[in-house]
Image: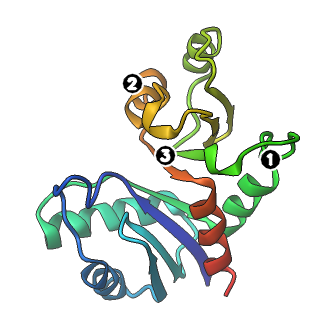
Amino acid sequence: MGKYISILRGINVSGSKMIKMDALRKMYESLKFKNVATYIQSGNVIFESNSTSPGELQKLIEKKILKVFGFEVPVIVIDKKEVAAVIKNSPFVKRKNIDVTKLHVTFLSEEPEQANIEKIEIAKYLPDEFIISGKAIYLHCPNGYGNTKLNNNFFENKLKVSATTRNWKTVNELLRLAEL
């Protein structure tokens, strides 16, 4: 049985697309997932499944959310091993004097096309920085994520894939919970 982390985009923000974590956990359990746990109110769910396809799990969860809660929510499902690799390979954590509270990871639904990556890599968004690696974008936003142009909408529009972002602390906590 594989261990997965699903990250929902845009729930419980500014009073829209409200989902209580108890209800979300019960919905996941109704899909026959095991050891379901949620972390904070922004739609982070750790679970076990016999499925080996994050893409199939994503579609299944999105359909069930629409049926149960009545609205569409983009979902990204990541294998526990992928999250561990994302943390291990962070290029920013290795820098001296880095403020980890200014680090984020944007998770992508799929790897973006190289042509789309090249279009945004040539522009400078300083002081903010990003590095794309597979289905993850490492972000360093020295003035805070709330003040950057490098948000989910930016990456979705430019890369033509779904995206959702979590801060460095949350990414690490999700892995810790998945390893329990």
Q: Residues within 10 Å of mark 1 (few under 14, many from 20)?
A: some
Question: Distance from label 2 to label 1 (Cα)?
Answer: 27 Å
Q: Residue at x 36, y 59 (%)?
A: 59
Q: Residue at x 65, y 29 (%)?
A: 130
In the rendered image, residue 179, in percent from the top left (x then y), is placed at 69, 81
On the image, numbered disc 3 is attached to which residue? 109
Q: What residue type is labelled 2?
A: Asn
Residue 12 visible, this orientation: yes
Q: Residues within 10 Å of mark 2 (few under 14, many from 20)?
A: few
Q: Earlier in the sequence, mark 2 or mark 1?
A: 1
Q: Which residue is drawn at 52% across and 53% down?
A: 166
Q: Which residue lies furthest to the left in this view?
A: 70
Q: Residues within 10 Å of mark 3 (few under 14, many from 20)?
A: many
* Numbered circle sitting on residue 157: 2
Which quarter of the picture shows residue 65? bottom left
Q: Quadrant of the N terminus?
A: bottom right
- Nearest the viewer among 114 and 137 is 137
Q: Which residue is drawn at 57% across and 15% down?
A: 120
Q: What residue type is labelled 3?
A: Ser
- Marks 2 & 1, CB-CB < 8 Å contact: no
- Nearest the viewer among 51 and 24 is 24
